[in-house]
Amino acid sequence: MKTFPFSGRLASLLLALVLLTAFAGPKLTKTTVGKNITIGVPQGFSALPDDGIAAKYPAPRKPLAVFTNPSGRVDLSVAQKPTTFTDRDYGLLLKIYKSSIQNMYSKVEFLSEDIRTINKRDFIALEFVSSVADNKRGSNLSPIRRYQFVQYAIQGDQLLVFTFNCPAEEQPQWRPTAQALMQTITIK
């Protein structure tokens, strides 16, 4: 049987290319949000205009920015609000935010919870799947389940909140992207 060294090399090269492509991270675009904050936004996401933010996130203090995928089912938001805590309070704040999240939803499954350093800045990180059930008598609606990754940081007297969320059934697709983009946050 005759072997062809060229085809063996080509097959090895193609295998290496496929493996490199498979392990390449998600495509993120470095984006400036507010003063002195940058984050990697997934390719294909677009910024919501102010009226879109108001409709999707009705709150007295609107987020600095919200980016959404073309279907509108997956969001990345950046919010800022005043705080009296300092970056020395992260251990306490981790417990407070975890408890607050548990009280906000019918059920919460935490995937990770810690204080981590990213780009020389400490963050409180909470990654979880939340469920909200309709507890009205006679209701047969399925619970609404969401995958969420939230990171908090204190900058001076401001609390910065970075949130990625998507439907729980899309978690396997989006979790690597959420984890990668949270690693790109830079606060100056």
Image: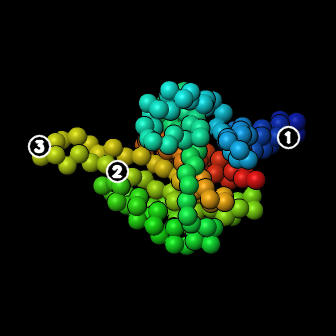
The one of 9 and 62 positioned closer to us in this rendering: 62
Q: Pointer 3: what residue?
A: 138
Instruction: Report the residue at 58% width, 45% height from top.
Output: 78
- Gap in angstroms between the C-alphas marked 3 and 1: 65 Å
Q: Is residue 175 visible?
A: no
Left or right: 19 with respect to 82? Answer: right
Left or right: 52 with respect to 118? Answer: left
Asked if marks 2 and 1 touch (Cβ < 8 Å), the reply is no
Query: Residue 92: where, in percent of width, then height?
Result: 51, 72
Left or right: 25 with respect to 174? Answer: right
> Which element type, helix, strand or loop, lies under badge 1?
helix
Query: Residue 27: where, in percent of width, then height?
Result: 69, 38
- Gap in angstroms between the C-alphas marked 2 and 1: 51 Å
Q: Which mark is residue 9?
A: 1
- Gap in angstroms between the C-alphas marked 3 and 2: 19 Å
Badge 3: few (under 14), some or many (20 or more) residues near its Cα, within 10 Å?
Answer: few
Badge 1: few (under 14), some or many (20 or more) residues near its Cα, within 10 Å?
Answer: few
The colour scheme used here is rainbow
